[in-house]
Image (cartoon, grey):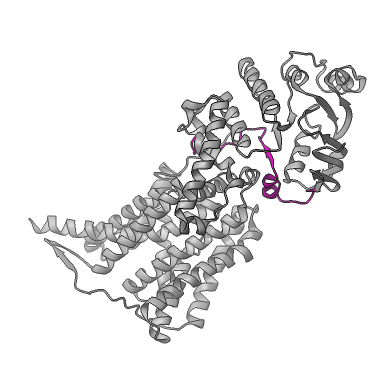
Amino acid sequence: MSDDLSFFFLLMSNGLLIGLMYSLIALGFVLVYKATDAINFAQGEFVMIAGFVTAGALMVWGAPLWVAVALALVSLVAFGFVLERVMLRRLIGRPVIAVVMATIGLAAILRGVGPFVIFSGTKPLPLPIRDEPFMLGPIFIPPIQLLGAGVSLAFLAGFGWFFLKSRKGIAMRAVADNQQVAMAMGIDVERYFGVAWAMTGVVSALGGILWGNLLGVDVNLALVGFKVFPVVILGGLDSIPGAIIGGLIVGVVENIAAGYVDPYVGGGTKDFAPYVLMILALMIRPYGIFGKRIIERV
Amino acid sequence: MSGLLEIRDASKSFGGVQAVTRVSLEAQKGEILSVIGPNGAGKTTVLNMISGFYHPDSGRISLEGRDVTELAPSRIAELGVARTFQNIALFRGMTVLDNLMLGRHVHMKTGVLSACAYWGLAQKEEVVHRRRVEDIIDFLRIQDLRRRPTGSLPYGLQKRVELGRALALDPKVLLLDEPMGGCNHEEKEDMARFILDVNEEWGVTVILIEHDMGVVMDISDRVAVLDMGQKIAEGTPDEVRANPRVIKAYLGETKAVPSTGGSRV
């Protein structure tokens, strides 16, 4: 195999794996949007806080790994529940901009509080997996990316099943579709909102642990959250398969940009290439690849 | 004798607009009570107060003697009040079967977490509910539509599925908001038959809002007439038809006397 071709395969495989890790975070965003119509601009900060909790438990308090992971899961789930009860429930029925601004504000607060309460500076988040990549012919795969992709796929499939097949998931879709009608079916809408935020907490906790391992934990961990926007715009705000496809596209596009364009322009295209795609998508197909096409009826 | 569902002096205003003024209604167990009136008379507001979407500013609503005035819509549904909506409100992306199963929601006991923990129990429960839903599917003759997304169905069938979803709740009281609105003659006849069957065979008390006077007069046990948010008449179809105030209310609104067999203006 030529060097060019193997370089291409390397970029692709790496992009796909990283892409699935984006999908995991995007899943957190999609879950909340699907069930509650809220756009969560603090998704990256959820992930960051999970990283802080896990790394703090491991490195500062010296807890064993399973305790740290459990702590991250429990605290993020609780955080999701409380956030819905205390803040978002009051914003139900308000214009979308109210929730957007509230979550942007929340994001800023989390970025301030995380380092202040738990630790400052950057800490590693070590996981007991090997460092040396698996070699598959010309491509090499870092084990953390493989783990991340596996966890992502498992949760994407799990939630996909939940919404498609389980009664509770279908009820949650009913809530998302039309709150008033869902209430007339006897569905306790607010409880489902809480459950949706708690689910986002689970996904964010896992995202925080995986990305924290990859990037190290500090405030900049929240920046992975920005990648959620091109992912969900490409895939569709309310679509779980869309989160997978969108994630894969973003992962591949940024790797291809980094591999082929960066050498000519001196770097940096990786960071904005997905957004170029996002803007193009908004112009051509605003409801995403799998998103629900909303037809306004008068 | 007291009614199954009683509304006592209910009033509701939105901003400065008095939508409903001191309206009292009583649905006796097992009857079909129609609520008619010109557009904007407050009919849907009354229905929304019964369902708990609006709480009256004053007055009380009770179901089987129990005060339900301030209950949330989901609680009222749990107590056995089901409804359909003026504009079809099916979950459009879902199949007919999923919509009907959602109608069973109040009877499903397992919570989100316990549903995961007691997998077998949830499965058993699913079978019971599915059986009930199949009865309704047979009753409404929509056997071949089970797996169809509701959004793809013709209008009349969507109305039928929405009725089915309300029936899946096994309601004591069924609130129907213009179940025949926008339907053609044949669809209206089918719907009228379903409503009568539900009422007679299953003993469900029906409160019906409908503009088609022919249907209303044919199938109702009693008719209440609202105009400008107030009840202006109540009685058997014949009594109401002969009531001068009713004729006047309709004349003022539509310049036409409602006649049997006439369709929506």
Q: Quadrant of the C terminus of chain B?
A: top right
Residue A109's spot in the image, x, y percent? 55, 73
Side (left or right) of B233 relative to B135: right
> Magenta residues, as a range?
B67-95
Looking at the image, is B110 positioned above or below residue B216?
Answer: below
Q: Is residue B87 magenta?
A: yes
Residue at coordinates 59% horizontally, 56% vertically from top-left? A97
Looking at the image, is B43 positioned above or below residue A169?
Answer: above
Which quarter of the figure has residue B188? top right
Looking at the image, is A210 positioned above or below residue A94?
Answer: below
Report the magenta stretch's main SS: loop
Residue B8 seen from this side: yes
Which quarter of the figure has residue A123? bottom left
Residue A145's spot in the image, x, y percent? 28, 65
Of A124 and A167, the residue lying toward us: A167
Residue at coordinates 47% horizontally, 59% vertically from top-left? B117
Residue A218 seen from this side: no
Residue A80's spot in the image, x, y percent? 54, 65
Q: Is residue B69 magenta?
A: yes
Side (left or right) of A258 relative to A135: right
Spot the residue most to the right. Answer: B244
Of A247 and A223, the residue lying toward us: A247
Spot the residue most to the bottom. Answer: A61
Residue A247's spot in the image, x, y percent? 35, 55
Looking at the image, is A170 positioned above or below residue B263?
Answer: below
